Amino acid sequence: MYQSWQSKLGFAIILTVIYGTQKIASTCLDLVYCISFKNRSNLFIHAETECWKTWQLVVIGYIYSTMVPQCFVFLFGPRLLESNLIGLWQFILALFVPIPFLFFWGCLIIRKLLKKQHLASDIKNFHPTTSKIIDEIVGPYNSSNVPSWICWIGFVDLRRLSLVLCKTFIH
């Protein structure tokens, strides 16, 4: 089957984010893990470096503003994409800047719920590019006993982040 360059590029970006998140999270958490050494708080990976410098606070801010909300993008985004409420490039941009998009998506979900409409549309007439990406993201995690607005890849990403936390802080 012929795939457009947009489909290939979008899918490559999404896969890179899914698999790259683990390495980025591991590195960021290694950079903020401190131990007490000679009555000082020092960096675990380099004991001569003192902790809680400005750059470490920036890394912590990055973790809380990007890495954690990204799990929620993967939790809600694919279903919103599937129900044609958002576009493919909005979903991809939300992977890099998740907080504003999560607020916007929350408003979309609340508006739909207030109108008493289901999030999952019965007629799936979206672009073939989006269709291929939805099949790849949602397909392996599809389950009939899960609410229609949840996508399991978000839980998988959250679990992966939890495992990285355990790996970093439990030696």
Image: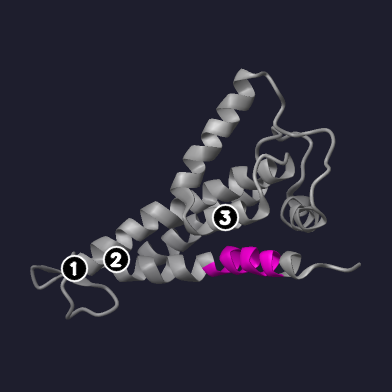
Image location (x, y in percent) of residue 145: 75, 34
Q: Please name the amino acid that badge 2 sits on.
A: Val
Image location (x, y in percent) of residue 132: 80, 58
| Figure quadrant of residue 55 | bottom left
Q: Label 3, on which residue?
A: 157
Image location (x, y in percent) of residue 133: 74, 57
Q: Which numbered disc flags the more N-terminal residue, 2 or 1?
A: 2
Q: Label 2, on which residue?
A: 32
The answer to whether the residues at label 3 and label 1 have Cβ atoms under 8 Å apart is no
Residue 13 located left or right of residue 55: right
User: Quick one: which residue is furthest to the left in this view?
Assistant: 39
Q: Label 1, on which residue?
A: 51
- What kind of element bears circle 3? helix
Confirm whether residue 155 shows in the render: no
The answer to whether the residues at label 2 and label 1 have Cβ atoms under 8 Å apart is yes
Please tell me whether the stretch drawn in magenta is mainly helix, strand or loop.
helix
Residue 68 located left or right of residue 86: left
- What kind of element bears circle 2? helix
Confirm whether residue 169 shows in the render: yes
Measured Cα–Cα span from mark 2 to mark 1 = 8 Å
Decide whether residue 85 is among the magenta residues. no
| Figure quadrant of residue 125 | top right
Q: Quadrant of the C terminus?
A: bottom left
Q: Please name the amino acid that badge 1 sits on.
A: Cys
Image location (x, y in percent) of residue 139: 78, 52
User: Quick one: which residue is furthest to the right in this view?
Assistant: 1
Q: Please name the amino acid that badge 3 sits on.
A: Asp
